Amino acid sequence: MLDSLQLMISGFGIATTMQNLFYCLMGAIVGTLVGVLPGLGPIAGIALLIPATFGLNPTSAIIMLAGIYYGAMYGGSTTSILLNVPGETASVITCIDGYQMAQKGRAGPALAMCAIGSFIAGTIGIFGLVFLAPPLAEAALAFGPPEYFSLMVFGFIVLSNVTGTSLIKALMMAVVGLIIGTIGIDPVTGNERFTFGSAPLLGGIEFVAVAIGLFGIGEVLVNVEKPLGMLEEKVIFPRLKELYPSLQDLKRSITAILRGTGIGFGVGLVPGPAPVIATYASYMTEKKVSKHPDEFGKGAIEGVAGPESANNSACQSAFIPLFVLGIPFAPPTAILLGALLIHGVNPGPMLIGQHPQLFWGVIASMYIGNFILLLLNLPFVPFFANILRIPKKILLPLVILFCITGMYTVNNSVFDIWMMLLFGGLGFMMRKWAYEGAPLLLALVLGPKLEVAFRQSLMMSRGDFSIFVSRPVSLVFLLATILFLLVPVFRILFKKKKGRDVKVQS
Amino acid sequence: MLTKKLIISLALLSIVSVGMPLPAAEFPTKEVQIIIPWSAGGATDLIFRALAANTGKYLGKAVVVINRPGGAGAVGYTEGMQARPDGYTLTAAVPPLTILPHWVTTAFTYRNFEPILNVVSDPSMFLVRSDAPWKSLQEFLDYAKKNPNMITVGNAGAGGGVHLVALAFERAAGVKFNHIPFAGGGPSVTAILGGHVNAVSVSPPEGIEHVKAGKLRIMALFAKKRLELFPDAATVREQGIDFVMGMWRGLIAPKGAPPDAIKKLHDAFKQGMEDPVFIKNARDMAVNLSYLGPEDFGKLMAHDHELYGQLVKEVKK
Amino acid sequence: MKRSEAIGAVIIFLFGGITALLSLKMPIGTFRVAGSGLFPLCLGLLLMALSGLFLLTLSFGSERIIEKKDRVVFIPGSVKQILPFFAALVLATLFFKELGYPLTSFLLLLSLLRILGVNRWTTNIPLSLVTVVASYLLFVKWLQIPLPKGWIGF
């Protein structure tokens, strides 16, 4: 441990050279811009800048690219809060309460809380990364297909009704999401499903298209429906002292942030779109433990602080499998892997040993990056909050352009734009009939993986279902799911019993 | 109202077209794109990113890589086929180009493309954990013969290159494995590291680092000769099974691309391949450079198209 | 109110039904060796069950009806805005590749602003122009994202 500390300090030395600080800053700025634009996520940002890093030494290159990764995470929440357009996939949950807060004139506190929460999560996360990396990586390896399946069943059941309006409606949306997730090529057999001979559909429907469509375009359409007179108005005029979080906000959020950090860090170890899942899990947790659960969905600050922290710490722990095992679990880390390879650094079990300055330099700069981003984002809060002062009739077309541009940048595909419009229309209809988009998106993300894990497990066991319960980790998750489902049943039974006891006593 | 808008738009258009650059000039007048039909971070992606970076200077214009993942490569190849045949949009060709049309209905086959050159040719291999009970290929195959369908072999996706390699090897060795598909090379290597499958079918650079670190071992090498990096790993040929199969990775353009553009691209990429920085990149990734000119590459694709056609037919029976 | 909720549920029911029907065309296999169609089939059936259940709860009146101002399904006058707005989006997407990014976005912004009531050309045009130029500089020039060029050349 002492060794690690010493190395970390030398890492700080490397990270704080003028050169590396500059690259970190560049990365952070580009990342924020990239994150703010919907659709264009860290993947594209990092990919775009890889060529620019060719002249640099590996450490500086990775510092810059990692900076983009975070910057994008920070930036993604900005548009979610201001415009209900998820800047990138993990910011979907932030739209829920963040946008509501903005509508009430509290965009400033929401934005600031995101930055603060992300910073705290990032800081704690880095310590986790440093001290827990190797054992966690080993733990991550223990997850094989049966464990993923059980984990995802658990996550799915627990998180489906995350916005908590009507369970049956949420489940309906979740199943719709699952069905949409099957479109494309069946990953297990390679057969086409529901593609109707269309080439773009072979790749399935792009998640970003659905997210931006349902939330962003849907929201715009709902606004367009309002009488023209209403569009003259602007969102509430934020006053200066309301631009930053109040003490009460901070008090309420701090526990949310800490919990979010823990949840995110754990969830981030799971392969796949971990940050998204982490945000859902954090939101759900905050809702359950909160003293004011009815505020959720209408602008509860914990609903923003918690998920954003979870998002950030999930990004941190996503680096663990990359650095320790050399395997990227999520697309952004996959590109970082590519960048490392191009620079002649081969991530794998020997990375830390062979290139200690790289590893520790990058770790230290991650911390610095978080700090820089906090400094970058906080002063801009009033600027961003004031965007909402633009009259809606001007703002809405700009948002549309913003969404279309961003959407196109993901896959350079006009088909995606069509999908986005389709889901925009769908989102509009869903609002009318009070169906939530969040369960649909979660299902879209988890569904394909759930199905694949299920079929892989059965292939491994040659059709034997006991594989799910004979492996300890898998069994644990399945039991947890059953317990969770039984809680409401227990509650009812318990109430009845209490009622009877009371009767007997009197 | 409408006419006003129309007039203004026309006015703007004319202003803009006056400043329009004339098309004439020499190829290339703008950057060249390479479509990679997989997501970032995979073997093909990494190799072509490195090549693109090193070819820009020889071509005179930047070469950029764009990812079009989906459909096990189908999305990318379909788009590559439909791109304008002007030489500015290329596609990275790997065996799935010749496998997919037999596996699912696709709009494309290799015949919709013009070969430019082949860059890499890597043998595939089976990796096992270093603590696996089978110490030699013989032991592995004996076990497989006695227990058909028991040994789980992971691959990077059903119908993908390494999956087909595993299927072909089964036939050559006379055994039957239990193939478990994963969503790419990364997850399949993760699975073997965690011990969830017995072996994994890969192509470099997937898994190489772990072999270097001693966590994984090469069980079967489907190459003509031993690898430079791991001289102790014998090929299956040496051990009595005449089986060589690998992954080639090259560049193609849509059919109808102008021949002089193809020539320019070919020359530039060949120089890129010979660039010392790229050679170092390739060596670090344990990737084997193997240049083939357009004609030979075309023949290779035709040959593999037939080969995989047969193989897939047998498998799908 | 209940009627429109019911219509929503019926649409979902039909969606589930179509899914189930289409998935029957694919190999189903068994649970042990699942074919491609098994999962979608189960999902389609599940969706039909859920929406059916929902319809039942509606008809027995136990479903809470959320009182909110915008619960009304269709505001009559608003069709005048939504349809042209959406139509503009559709047109822009249709011609996105041909006209190229800058031109399409310019025309789109013009139309949308007009539809939403920005009547003065003196605000409309400069605003659209500035936005398009700014986004062009940012995305095409600086970030080098390949946005379609269209026949006017950029």
Image (cartoon, coloured by chain):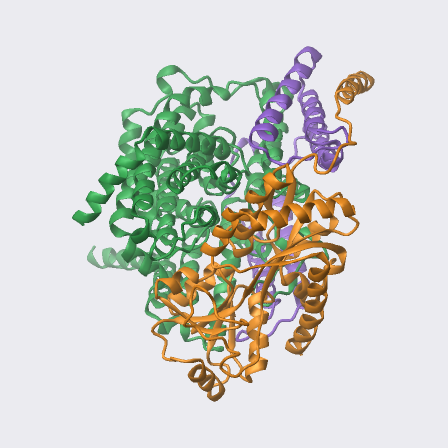
Chain colours: A green, B orange, C purple
- Image quadrant of residue A122? top left
The image position of residue B153, as x and y in percent, is 48, 73
List the single residue furthest toward the left. Answer: A2
Q: Report whether residue B128 is seen.
A: yes
Residue at position x 38%, y 65% in the image:
A478
Q: Report whether residue C60 is seen.
A: no
Asked whether, in this view, residue C76 is left or right of residue B1, the answer is left
Give above or below for B288 relative to A165.
below
Residue at position x 64%, y 76% in the image:
B315
The image position of residue B233, as x and y in percent, is 43, 72
Query: Which of the image's four quarters has the C terminus of chain A?
Result: bottom left
Asked whether, in this view, residue A1 is left or right of residue A307, the answer is left
The image position of residue B191, as x and y in percent, is 42, 65
Asked whether, in this view, residue A119 is left or right of residue A433, the answer is left
Closer to the camera in the image, A309 or A203: A203
Q: How many marks?
A: 0
The image position of residue A383, as x and y in percent, is 45, 19
